[in-house]
Amino acid sequence: MAQKAIKALKNYVGGKWIEANTVKTEAVVNPATGEVLAYVPLSSLEDINHAIETAAEAFETWKEIPVPKRARILFKYQQLLVENHNDLAKLITLENGKNFPEAYGEVQRGIENVEFATGAPSLMMGEQLASIATDLESGIYRYPIGVIGGITPFNFPMMVPCWMFPMAIATGNTFVMKPSERTPLLANRLAELLEEAGLPSGVFNIVHGAHNVVNGILDHPQVAGISFVGSQPVAEYVYKRGTNNLKRVQALAGAKNHSIVLHDANLDNATTQIMNAAFGSAGERCMAASVVAVEESIADEFIELLTQKANEIKIGNGLDEGIFLGPVIRDKHKERTLKYIEAGKKEGASLVRDGREDEAVKQKGYFVGPTIFDHVTSEMKIWQDEIFAPVLSIARVKNLSEAIGLANKSHFANGACIFTRDGGSVRQFREKIHAGMLGVNIGVPAPMAFFPFSGWKDSFYGDLHANGKDGLHFYTRKKVITTKWV
Ligand code: NAD
């Protein structure tokens, strides 16, 4: 089909939808069908510079708007998101591939971030001490920092942007977002609804594109802060280049999340949770379960039950009723995943369930069936690398100490879970494991909006994390005033 017949996306700058100053575009593909949904412009440096300058101008007036008035716009926005919940979820499934209930849940997580940001008037309050010395007092006031650049990944087109812009704008900053070029449709819808909620022009802007646009954000002197979420190498690059340019940067990166199943665990719960955490959203979650260390004494039973549940998974287009496992994001990503499965076999792991053999894998979309490896060791690439697909590695261990030691060998440290009924084991796990987000008897311990999203080691670069009070602090700076009453 000729490119002209399919929608070409525009950038959103200063309250207007404008064409990017580029001839370079990329197809936005429905990963369940291979159908081209739209073309996204790979905008130029000129485009991003223009958006940043527009946001810098808008900052001068937006920062003066009283905080409750800014919050009121977000209250309206929250209503609009709720009214559009179904349509937003459908759009996510269309461009990302995850099943509709998961997409619906993602929209809910995004809405919760907006709700948290409506609390800006209370959250931004300072602190005072009435007497630091005789007749002398001090107090703290909070202020926005300026233009924020937001760079987001493909796997949560709504939730991840909502970690950033609601709090950033509620606290008085202006925002320029560079959505993933693989899932840019939902971002434009978020902008339309912000406009409908009454957000003044220039406060929120979108520039579509790839590396060039990111570099433009990292280098522009009028960008004060950068929120990044994406893979580890890009997070490291963004953090280094952004901080080298003396900007405030938070960069949330990749992961390899470890679950530990002990002999006293409720195996029905553990297998259901791990099945969901490993294969839900096609394994394309930064909190996906990717390695399980299971105690040898229950390993056979655990694997049998898990495989049984994996065999029941329905694979297909996420918009169809009853589908659990949708496609991975692109054909290239599917090929990469299949290579990892082959590599795992060659490295000597036992392939318990081969997701290459599922019928759906032969369909047009980018499907990979649930794949389970047993007898995986930390020397193997399938143990070390973030595969970001429905591939689960199982390692057999003697006890909890060995399981924790094994997990801690990873340079990633995003999430970790334990399945047990024993309090002492939970405590040992909590104290010794290297990870920022822990789960006990649950598979995806992703914190809600009012808690920080807290990866450690190579899963996060920076100081203040996304969400919770960390988010508030990242998007604000303080003045401390000391007064002598004479
Ligand atoms: P990605 O790193 O490929 O892309 C993220 C963003 O960076 C996109 O907007 C992309 O355009 C841009 N980008 C990509 N390569 C670049 C380069 N060389 N220079 C400059 N910019 C570049 O990530 P993805 O594949 O879209 O998302 C999946 C990754 O995100 C996974 O690794 C996942 O673990 C991670 N993730 C982490 C969290 C977290 O909270 N830690 C949350 C969601 C996703």
Image: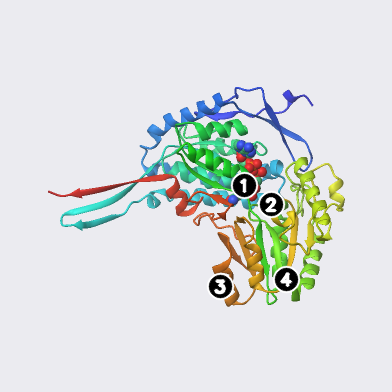
Asked if ligand 1 lies within 8 A of label 1, the reply is yes
Badge 2 amino acid: Glu
Q: Circle 1 sits on which residue?
A: 232
In front here: 362 or 229?
Answer: 229
Q: Circle 4 sits on which residue?
A: 268
Place of residue 453 in the rendered image (x, y in percent of width and height, measured from the top left): 54, 54
Taking the image as shown, residue 426 lies to the left or right of residue 128, namely right
Q: Residue at x 51, y 29 (%)?
A: 51
Q: Earlier in the sequence, mark 3 or mark 4?
A: 4
Q: Earlier in the sequence, mark 4 or mark 1?
A: 1
Relative to residue 387, is residue 240 depicted above or below? above
Helix, strand or loop at mark 2: loop
**Circle 2/circle 4 CB separation < 8 Å:** no
Q: Earlier in the sequence, mark 2 or mark 1?
A: 1
Q: Residues within 10 Å of mark 2 (few under 14, many from 20)?
A: many
The answer for how far apart the CA atoms under marks 3 and 4 are is 23 Å
Which corner quadrant of the figure contains ligand 1? Answer: top right
Place of residue 382 in the rendered image (x, y in percent of width and height, measured from the top left): 74, 55
